[in-house]
Structures are given as C-alpha cells and as structure tokens.
Image: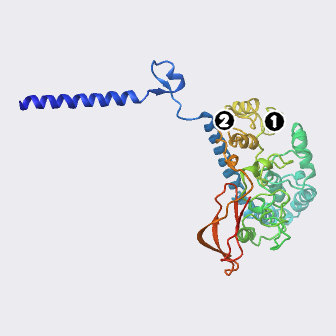
Amino acid sequence: MYSLVCRISLLVVALLFGAINLSYAASVPLTAEPGLSTLIPGVNTRNTCNPDFMEVLKNRAWMGAQRDITQNANIIPRPDSVLSLTCFDSWLDHLAKYAADNFPGDPDESDGKLLNGLLTDWLVVFIDDLLSDLDPNLTDGYVLYALLEILVLDQLEDVDSLTGAVSDGFNLAACIPLWGAEPKRRFLEDNFPDVMIGNRAKAQPATPSYSQISSRLDDNVNDGDNFNGCARMNQVWQRTKCYDFATESAVYKAAYAGAPNDHDGFYTFEDYRTNSTTGGRRDYRTEAGQCDAPSDDITAGFPSDLAEISCQIQANGIPSLPALGGAVSVSLGPPPSVTGAGGGLTWVQAYNAANPAPGASGAMDVYNNFLNIISGTTCAPPIKVGYIVADKNNLANQYIDSVCPTPGCYFDPPTSISGTGTCQY
C-alpha cells in the first residue's frame, strides 16, 4: 500500500512538471530577426526595438560626440612649436656670429694664410659677404649666415629674399595658382598659427590687457647679434596661467580678441546647427587647424585635391609606392567632406533627424494636455495646503500656499499670511 501511494505521488509530480513545462513553452513565442523568421516555420518576427527610434538615438549620439570634439579643440589649445618656444632664430644668429668670428668665416683664424689673410678677406669673403647682404641666394657658400637662411630658415619661414621667391615661383610654377605668388610650403607657416598658445596669445585691449606673443621667427639670419637667452617660453607660461576660460567668447566679454567669431564656450546643439549655416563661420573651431564643415556637395574639394598632388609632385618628385597609390585613391575617391551611410552628417541633418516632431517616426508620443476637459470660465476657490511661503528678499512677506481644483486655473497668492488668494484662468 505504501509503495502504491509513493508511485501515485511520483506520477502526480511528473504530470504537474509536464503541465508546467508545456504551459511555459506554449506561453513564450519563438522570435528571430526579420530575415531569419521567414525561413523557420512557427517563428515570429522579433519586434523588440523600434528602428526609427534607434536612428534618432544614433543621430543624437553623433551630435554629442561631435560637440565634445569641437569643444575640446576650443578649450584645449594646440601645443606650440618647440622651435618657436626656444627662439630657434636666435640660435641661428648665435651660430652665424660664432662662425663669423672663427674659421672658416674668418680666414685669419686658419693656418696657411697668405698676406696675413688679407687676400682671402678681400677677394673671397668680402665679395661673398657683400652679395649675401644683398640677397642670401647670391652667396657662393662661404658666409654661414646666408647658408643658414637658404638651407634652414627658408624651410621654416619665408625669408626676405627676392631671388629666392623668384626661384621658388619658377621651380613651382604649377603651384602658383593654388598657393599664391610664393607657393613654397614652409614648416612653421603651414603647420602652426602666427600667435602662441594655439593662436590665443593675441593683443587684448580690454581689461585685463595683453600684448601679442608672436610664434614667428625672424626672416633672416644675422651674424651681428649676441644671444642673450630666450624669454618666449616664460612669456607663454605667464600668459597661459592668466588665460581665463571662454576669454574669446561673447559670454566672457562683449569685445574680445578675435571677434566676431565666437568660440571657447559651451554651446547647445541648436547653437551648433545655427552656426553651421551662418555666413562663412560654419564651425566654432575658429583657431588654427579648423576643419571644413561636412558638406552634401559631392564635388567639394575634388579639383583642389588633384592640384595639390600635382603641386607636391613638382616640389618633391613622384612618391614611391604605396604612397602614390594612397594619394591617388584619396584624390579620385569621394571627397573628404562626403562619407558613406551612417557618417558625415551635417549639423542640420543630424539635428533634424535627432529631433523629430512628436508623433513622427522614432519620436515621442504626442503630448496630451487634457485642455479639452476645461469648461467654463469660473474657477473654484483655492484649497490651502498648509505650507507657508516666504519671500527670500523680505521674509516678512508670507502667505499660505494653495492649489486650484479646477483644471486650467492657476493660484494667484495673497499679499499676507491671513489672505486666501484667488484661482484664475
């Protein structure tokens, strides 16, 4: 008998478990992605995410990331050139003066001199020095300051050389329409702004006033100057310590250095959208290294890319593979301002896609304000809630807060704690 009861009990438990499992399996439908659900019988299409809402989130994320990148570029200045910070032009002057006072700049310092060096002084060095004073490109190679101008300084800055400019223009003739009358590419001029602290150490007439700290080197090498040290790094350090946040922003002061291009502040997504369509500004990154705003024009930048490659080939020769293939693919492919699906949006496109009207695809539901239940023009009397409100500027002015029971009515408080106030439309 006991054995029979145990068997019946086990059978009941098994049936219950089977019923539970069958009931659980039957209540949970099998789902899969749309493309897969059509291939498996009995499997429903998965609809756990609204793809339109996902697009709204993606565009909102794009704006958030783009704003962070832009504001970081504004708030964190680009590092200045070490050559500018250390007064590299003064070191060139120092080297030229040292060479002029020693061999080979001064033949009197050499062995085997003829007529105490006078012959070399007047027939070689004097003539070469005279020509180099007129233009360093005329030197025969004995005056070091002229060689330093041609071989070193002219690769960094545009030196004051008429024959050098003519020579560059002649040798780089194809680049003149693209880069101007002096098309030679120079390291400091083409890669760094004219003013230190990422073009922020400008002359500031407003309080506090500052003088400009230039990042440019001298346009010549002089063998007559003594090097007395470089104070530029200390000047930059002092200015950086005193540089206030949003100095070049209308939020900071009405008239700031660099106006009217407002930057250096925190801006809303709508600010970025509006600025991207305002005149020639289009981007809050107004300092050095500003990127062109994304464009829908598929031809934007296409001719200039080919011209720039031609210019570089004329100046530096044909690059070896694979650099040549990469340059051609960049030029002949889509311009940098145009990208594939999911990227390269303009601010207007992203803003509109991230802020659809209520009720549209991917947007929030239409707000129901229940104004339709408001009827009549009479408000019921206010109901006091027992909470005393005091004026923060005058604590003697107090009243008891109340609520209005009639929909659409607002509470107009009394002028004293003993008053009742009224409810009005």
Residue 130 on image: x %, y %: 93, 59
Q: Say what amino acid the circle numbered 1 marks.
A: Ala
Neighbour class for label 1 at 10 Å: few (<14), some, many (≥20)? some
- Which residue position is annotated with label 2? 361
Tell me the colour scheme of the image.
rainbow
> Is 398 or 364 nearer to us in this picture?
398
Q: Quadrant of the C terminus?
A: bottom right
Q: Nearer the viewer, mark 2 or mark 1?
A: 2
**Circle 1: element type:** loop
- Which residue position is annotated with label 1? 300
Furthest-left residue in this view: 1
In the rendered structure, which disc, 2 or 1, sits on the residue that comes first in sequence? Answer: 1
Residue 110 makes an appearance in the image: no
Residue in the picture at 63% in, 69% down: 401
Residue 165 makes an appearance in the image: yes
Relative to residue 343, is residue 281 drawn left or right?
A: right
